[in-house]
Amino acid sequence: MKALFLNLSLVLLTVFLPACSTDHSAQSAKSVDYYNKLLQQATRYVYTVQERGQLPGVGTGEHGHLELQSETLWDEQGHFLKQRITFPVTFNVSLTPDQRATEYRYKVSKTGEHAGWQIVGAWEKKKDGEWLEVR
């Protein structure tokens, strides 16, 4: 019982101390780590959907250049702007297949910490530069 209480006390201190502290560096480090984990999850999700043949505009087995774009996370001095990650989390993904001069953009979102990722929008860039929604 004593060990359980000690562990619970440490958890409570971990949760409340960063909010009271003026130095947010430890909380920022945790947020950066968690944000990087979310980026990795989103990337794996897009690859998995593509391998299943369910990524709009791109066939199973196609290769290309994938780029994740996220919101601005650091200020001009290099300080992490988000002290806490809030949901929903949304990333924009650009994909250019190797054998085609076409670019696709996808918006992937996760509504909660334990929720799955989903594609909430997909677009293809036409030769005239206009973006057309694809399904």
Image (cartoon, helix red, strand yellow):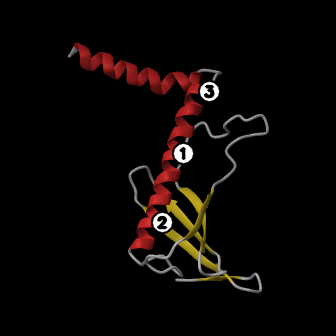
Closer to the N terminus: mark 1 or mark 3? 3
The disc labelled 2 sits on which kind of residue?
Answer: Val
Residue position marked by numbered label 1 in the rendering: 35
Between 4 and 75, the residue placed more toward the observer is 75
Quadrant in the picture for residue 54 = bottom left
Neighbourhood count class around disc 3 (C-alpha, 10 Å): few under 14, some 14–19, many 20 upward: some
Judged from the image, the secondary structure of the residue bearing numbered disc 1 is helix
Question: In the image, residue 58 lies at what x, y percent?
Answer: 51, 79
**Residue 128 seen in this snapshot:** yes
Residue position marked by numbered label 2 in the rendering: 46
Residue contact at pointers 2 and 1, CB within 8 angstroms: no
Residue position marked by numbered label 3 in the rendering: 24
Residue located 40% across and 56% down the image: 115
The disc labelled 1 sits on which kind of residue?
Answer: Tyr
Q: CA distance from mark 1 to mark 3?
A: 16 Å
Quadrant in the picture for residue 24 = top right
Residue contact at pointers 2 and 3, CB within 8 angstroms: no
Q: CA distance from mark 2 to mark 3?
A: 33 Å
Neighbourhood count class around disc 1 (C-alpha, 10 Å): few under 14, some 14–19, many 20 upward: some
Residue located 24% across and 13% down the image: 2
Between 26 and 102, the residue placed more toward the observer is 102
Closer to the N terminus: mark 2 or mark 3? 3
Judged from the image, the secondary structure of the residue bearing numbered disc 3 is loop
Q: CA distance from mark 2 to mark 1?
A: 17 Å
Closer to the N terminus: mark 2 or mark 1? 1
Quadrant in the picture for residue 74 = top right
